Image: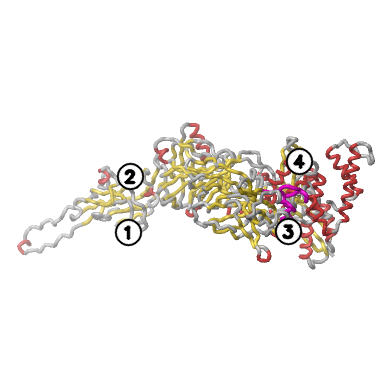
């Protein structure tokens, strides 16, 4: 009962209670009407009870309160929490954890605190590692690693973050860019129709795409803005040396087209990429192995030398396999005469008198380069470059002046190697009379040598063409080569927002238990369906949702079949579950925040269930038995009875008052004493042989069982393949019952409400009877959870004492509170839906500027100020009077300023700023903020504060 429930306040409280039931009732003291007479009678009875209670000695008050046992539920509450069961690493089977499995934590004085599971689960050795949220409507994919996000949390179905959605076209070339010192490309593409071709060219040259070339180690070099030139796209990087990259087991070059915006639906039929035509002197010219740098070249020497050769090499130009090559030069000849030395003749005497003879002379023979071999170095050796026979005789003097030679660069041209003499050579194979003397050599001279290449339409197709859409890579090469058309970019996700969970091992189990630690600031449940990945794609999975649509912390129990498959999605290879959101009108700041996802979690409660048996010595005398435990939560008593030759245990009921007859027993739940009244067994067919009495009872450890995270580490039940247990969160909700304060408060509430809630105070009484630790509530009729008008709803916000430990504290008692309120209120009869929520907590940040004469003990002043700010904002003990804040009441700057002035000495407050994090952003708490604030369930909690100290000027 309330301590200040005096006679002066009796009629006032009765009249207020009466108006709750009958608003039109008017009480007149001493009135003759039935209502006034009944009020006077009740008032006198309350006053008499208060007077009698005041005369009771202190040590008998508990016994006095126990007279109301028939009305009061035992004022006890056992600690609750969640425990994670970890199977042996590598265990491929399922580890069943049945209901009632015990886990232990060390208690005081070397004792043990026992917890039991409230439901059964199947533990499997797996863990979720990746979370991916997709939105096909917005074209966004956000990927998160649970190892990083487990501490900070992330919004369920939230898409704020780095968008990894990508639509890219990969053009792969094996050798096309070998030896290039720049990239000067022309890109041509066609679609199925002229409109599609025009659309492709506009896209390729538009601002919504980015062209780049892949570099080793994952880098990319971006092309400047592309230019459209007729029916082609011009890309240029100068100077730039392309580098080979590795794709799988293949090496080559890759040009990438990245779509920056939402992809258009375009089909592509052909695509060619050709380097721009280039003409230049070959990089290296050798004659008989010696490098030449002159403008005029004598390929076969002066004079001619049989089998002499000239080689040409250029890493870039000669690497253009399949390209149209053009070799141009100017051909001229240089005459080289080689004379023969004639022998001198001896003069004879007889010839002196004869006429002189003419001198001996020899006619010079003309030597020409009759046959020259044009060859190229293939992968298997030297081969003829030209098939035309006349090319072999072009240096025999029949051709002179400008010479242009066209050929197709062979497909089997050898690869470039350093210190290689050359891949094209001219070799003198035949020259008639080359060894005759005297000789007149007509030596070919080459000047102005130029080599160039170009690509005709269809010649420079990429080796492979691939399109990548959100990690879905498809090869279009074969389709485009055979004349087909393919969709260039496309969406891989459905329009609905979807959240994927990636696991490192198969999650098949019956059932799979996933605990979601959730803060739902918006108090809006999310409708979703669950699916798992199979060979046929994602299939629906049966699910029991204890989170009520991510409305609060709790387990998801999923019946996952055995046909799960491993697949690589979004860059992660593993097994996948996904949750498809069925709603679309959520703001990001309203989405539930997932603090962590924990597999193999089971709800536990601090109970220790035991069974004891007792023997009955005398049926006629009263019997008393001391149970092995105290502070009992519940008890069940059975007595062995024998009828018609058959024996069996029959459950007896707990007596509601000391003189109640029948099959009843008495029990003191605090001391653990079980009693039977005198003659209780006289008329009961109890057999002689025992044990005749069997007792099932559970006890609890009260506040001692409110343990920090990581305290429960010992399995109390032997389970094979179980390696460890732990509680990731603190256990909470344990309260010591059987105290005068607790019992008095509950009895007072019951006397006021008689177990029926009508007023807000009555709802608080019912909630307090069902769950300990409830400090404040606020009831709003015709209101939904977001504070909007809803005639068919009633919302009750409940502030629990341990709210700072997380939403799982409230989630643990939410169901039992709702069940009690629905059962003992008029909501169901009125056709209303009860919504049970926590207050809508908003973080309040304070910045204070203090001024004082010196900086002495500035740190102590700063810490004192921070402590005062946190104390003022505390929902339970804050405010100027230290009574806490009501739900829906927000602190004001002026009140905080006055509070700090009263608590701080030797300084003055020069400036103060108070902000609140509301609707996903930080806003100042000014007059406009309070004017716009219409949420009846809002409550401030302490955020981040800063205290600045300045020295006043002298």
In the image, the segment drawn in magenta is 651-680
Q: CA distance from mark 2 to mark 4?
A: 107 Å
Local packing at callout 3 (Cα closer than 10 Å; few below 14, some 14-19, many 20+) is some
Residue designated by label 3: 671
Classify mark 4: residues with Cα within 10 Å, few (<14), some (14-19) or many (20+): some
Q: Are marks 3 and 1 in contact (CB under 8 Å)?
A: no
Q: Earlier in the sequence, mark 2 or mark 1?
A: 1
Helix, strand or loop status at disc 3: loop
The answer to which of marks 1 and 4 sits earlier in the sequence is 1
Residue on which the image places disc 4: 825
Circle 3 or circle 1, nearest the eye: 3
Q: Residue under circle 1?
A: 290
Question: Mark 2 against mark 4, which lies toward the viewer?
Answer: 4
C-alpha span from label 3 to label 1: 111 Å
Q: Are marks 2 and 1 in contact (CB under 8 Å)?
A: no
Magenta highlight on residue 345 = no
Sequence-wise first label, 3 or 1: 1
Find residue 451 and report its horizontal and vertical position in percent: 37, 48
Lower position in the chain sequence, tag 4 or tag 3: 3
Give the class, few, some or many, for how many residues have Cα within 10 Å of label 2's Cα (few <14, many ≥20): some
Going from N to C along the chain, the mark reached first, 2 or 4, is: 2
- Residue plotted at (87% across, 50% down): 49
Residue 735, visible in the rendered structure = no
Closer to the camera in the image, 484 or 495: 495
The Cα–Cα distance between marks 2 and 1, rounded to whole angstroms, is 24 Å
> Where residue 737 sits in the image (x, y, percent)?
75, 55
Total tally of numbered discs in the picture: 4
| Mark 2 lies on residue | 403
In percent of width and height, residue 409 lies at 35, 45
């Amino acid at each position: 009962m309330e301590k200040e429930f005096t006679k002066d306040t009796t009629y006032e409280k009765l009249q207020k209670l009466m108006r709750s039931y009958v608003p039109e009732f008017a009480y007149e003291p001493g009135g003759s009407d039935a209502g006034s007479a009944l009020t006077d009678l009740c008032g006198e009875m309350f006053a008499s009870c208060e007077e009698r209670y005041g005369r009771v000695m202190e040590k008998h008050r508990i016994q006095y309160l126990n007279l109301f046992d028939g009305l009061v539920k035992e004022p006890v509450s056992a600690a609750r929490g969640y425990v994670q069961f970890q199977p042996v690493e590598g265990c491929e089977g399922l580890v069943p954890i049945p209901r009632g499995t015990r886990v232990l934590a060390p208690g005081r004085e070397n004792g043990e605190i026992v917890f039991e599971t409230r439901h059964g689960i199947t533990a499997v050795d797996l863990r979720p590692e990746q979370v991916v949220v997709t939105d096909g409507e917005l074209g966004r994919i956000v990927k998160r690693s649970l190892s990083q996000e487990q501490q900070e949390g992330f919004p369920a179905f939230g898409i704020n973050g780095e968008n990894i959605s990508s639509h890219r076209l990969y053009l792969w070339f094996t050798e096309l860019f070998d030896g290039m010192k720049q990239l000067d490309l022309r890109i041509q593409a066609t679609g199925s129709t002229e409109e599609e071709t025009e659309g492709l060219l506009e896209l390729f040259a538009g601002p919504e795409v980015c062209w780049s070339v892949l570099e080793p180690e994952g880098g990319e070099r971006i092309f400047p803005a592309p230019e459209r030139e007729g029916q082609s796209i011009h890309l240029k990087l100068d100077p730039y040396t392309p580098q080979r990259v590795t794709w799988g087991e293949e090496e080559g070059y890759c040009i990438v087209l990245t779509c920056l915006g939402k992809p258009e639906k375009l089909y592509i039929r052909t695509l060619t990429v050709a380097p721009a035509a280039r003409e230049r002197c070959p990089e290296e010219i050798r004659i008989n192995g010696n490098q030449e740098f002159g403008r005029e070249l004598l390929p076969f020497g002066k004079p001619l030398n049989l089998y002499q050769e000239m080689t040409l090499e250029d890493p870039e130009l000669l690497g253009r396999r399949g390209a149209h090559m053009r070799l141009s030069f100017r051909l001229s000849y240089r005459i080289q005469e080689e004379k023969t030395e004639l022998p001198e003749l001896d003069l004879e005497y007889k010839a002196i008198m004869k006429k002189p003879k003419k001198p001996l002379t020899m006619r010079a023979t003309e030597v020409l380069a009759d046959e020259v071999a044009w060859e190229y170095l293939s992968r298997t050796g030297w081969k003829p470059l030209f098939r035309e026979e006349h090319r072999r005789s072009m240096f025999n003097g029949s051709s002179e002046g400008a010479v242009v030679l066209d050929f197709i660069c062979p497909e089997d041209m050898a690869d470039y190697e350093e210190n290689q003499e050359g891949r094209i050579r001219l070799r003198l194979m035949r020259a008639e009379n080359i060894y005759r003397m005297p000789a007149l050599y007509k030596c070919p001279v080459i000047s102005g040598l130029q080599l160039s290449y170009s690509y005709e339409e269809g010649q420079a197709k990429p080796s492979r063409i691939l399109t990548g859409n959100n990690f879905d890579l498809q090869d279009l090469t074969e389709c485009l080569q055979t004349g087909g058309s393919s969709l260039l970019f496309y969406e891989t996700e459905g329009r609905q927002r979807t959240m994927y969970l990636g696991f490192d091992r198969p999650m098949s189990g019956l059932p799979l238990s996933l605990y979601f630690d959730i803060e739902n600031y918006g108090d809006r449940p999310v409708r979703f369906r669950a699916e798992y990945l199979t060979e046929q794609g994602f299939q629906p999975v049966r699910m029991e949702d204890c989170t009520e649509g991510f409305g609060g912390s709790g387990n998801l129990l999923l019946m996952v079949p055995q046909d799960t498959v491993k697949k690589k999605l979004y860059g992660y290879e593993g097994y996948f579950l996904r949750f498809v959101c069925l709603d679309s009108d959520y703001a990001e700041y309203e989405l539930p925040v997932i603090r962590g996802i924990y597999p193999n979690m089971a709800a536990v409660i601090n109970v220790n269930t035991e069974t004891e048996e007792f023997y009955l010595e005398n049926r006629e005398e009263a019997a008393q038995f001391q149970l092995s435990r105290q502070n009992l939560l519940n008890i069940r008593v059975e007595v062995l009875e024998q009828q018609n030759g058959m024996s069996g245990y029959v459950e007896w009921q707990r007596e509601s008052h000391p003189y109640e007859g029948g099959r009843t027993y008495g029990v003191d739940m605090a001391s653990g004493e079980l009693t039977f009244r005198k003659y209780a067994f006289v008329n009961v067919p109890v057999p002689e042989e025992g044990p005749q009495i069997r007792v099932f009872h559970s006890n609890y450890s009260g506040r001692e069982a409110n343990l920090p995270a990581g305290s429960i580490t010992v399995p109390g039940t032997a389970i094979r393949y179980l390696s460890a247990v732990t509680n990731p969160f603190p256990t909470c909700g344990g309260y010591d019952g059987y105290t005068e304060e607790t019992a008095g408060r509950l009895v007072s509430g019951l006397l006021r409400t008689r177990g029926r809630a009508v007023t807000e105070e009555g709802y608080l009484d019912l909630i307090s009877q069902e769950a300990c630790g409830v400090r404040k509530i606020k009831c709003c009729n015709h209101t939904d959870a977001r504070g909007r008008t809803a005639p068919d709803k009633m919302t009750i916000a409940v502030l629990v004492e341990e709210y700072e430990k997380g939403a799982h504290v409230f989630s643990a008692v939410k169901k039992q509170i709702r069940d009690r309120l629905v059962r003992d209120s008029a909501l169901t009869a009125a056709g209303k839906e009860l919504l049970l929520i926590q207050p809508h907590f908003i973080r309040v940040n304070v910045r204070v500027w203090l001024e004082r004469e010196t900086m002495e003990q500035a740190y102590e002043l700063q810490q004192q100020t921070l402590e005062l700010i946190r104390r003022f904002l505390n929902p339970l003990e804050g405010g100027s009077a230290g009574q806490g804040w009501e739900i829906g009441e927000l602190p004001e700057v002026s009140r905080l300023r006055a509070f700090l002035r009263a608590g701080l000495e030797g300084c003055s407050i020069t400036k103060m700023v108070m902000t609140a994090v509301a609707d996903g952003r930080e806003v100042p708490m000014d007059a406009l903020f309070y004017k716009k604030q219409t949420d009846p369930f809002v409550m401030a909690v302490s955020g981040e504060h800063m205290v600045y100290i300045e020295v006043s000027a002298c």
